[in-house]
Image (cartoon, helix red, strand yellow):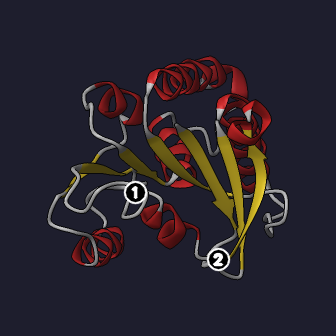
Amino acid sequence: MRILVTGGVRSGKSRHAESLLSPPHLPAGSPVTYLATGPQLDDADWAARVAAHRDRRPDSWTSVETTDAAGALTRTSDPVLLDCLGTWLTAQLDDLDAWEAPEPSWGRRLDARIDALETAWSASTHVVAVTNEVGWGVVPAHRSGRVFADRLGLLNQRLAASADRVLLVVAGQVLVVKDTSREQA
């Protein structure tokens, strides 16, 4: 089961994603790998957010802080919470120095990383990915804002196409956008 949970900032999407990997969806005490895909893994603010998330999760969950989400997905057989595609993309754009450079210098390398993530996502048996819905968000009217929104929108579309379920969280309320299990019933 691959589930994409999308929504705006502070919409409740991460908490909902966590609930999808907790009872009654999984037995109590089930091992879960939480992939924190921060923009800068040595950033104090980011570390504080990851720690706060870690503190509210069961002891059976393992936190992995990485920008290599594709590699981490392929290295675990546990159910996975990948949080968040927006921060993963930011880390990739930082690494590729994409914010100011013309696209030909980084576009193909980013596309290869997105391809690897999509392949790992498609091969995963139980993963819940959290992402920001850029279609409703405020996007800064400068090049970096457009680069981020364009690439995250395309990434969201690619993963949604192969997801079993796509959920939109608005003000803590969950809307089902796609559910292939309903189509198969």
| Residue 141 x %, y % | 85, 62
| Residue at 80% in and 58% down | 142
Q: Report helix, strand or loop for mark 2.
A: loop
Question: Which residue in the rendered view is the most extreme toward the front?
Answer: 185
Q: Classify 10 Å Cα crowding around label 1: few (below 14), some (14-19), many (20 and above).
A: many
Is 2 placed above or below 174 here?
above
Say which quadrant the C terminus sits in. top right
| Residue 145 x %, y % | 74, 56
Quadrant of residue 55 in the image?
bottom left
Tag 2: amino acid: Ser
What is the distance, in whole Å, between disc 2 and disc 1 at their CAs? 18 Å
Label of residue 11 in the image: 2
Q: Classify 10 Å Cα crowding around label 2: few (below 14), some (14-19), many (20 and above).
A: some
Q: Nearer the viewer, residue 45 or 52?
A: 52
Position of 110 compared to 144: left or right?
left
Tag 1: amino acid: Leu
Quadrant of residue 150 in the image?
top right
**Which mark's residue is nearer the viewer, 2 or 1?**
1
Is there a contact, CB below 8 Å, between mark 2 and mark 1? no
Question: Which residue in the rendered view is the most extreme toward the bottom?
Answer: 171
| Residue at 50% in and 27% down | 117
| Residue at 55% in and 44% down | 89
| Residue 64 x %, y % | 24, 49
Is 161 placed above or below 6 here?
above
Label of residue 21 in the image: 1
Q: Report helix, strand or loop for mark 1.
A: loop
Position of 157 compared to 67: left or right?
right
Position of 143 compared to 35: left or right?
right
Quadrant of residue 140 in the image?
bottom right
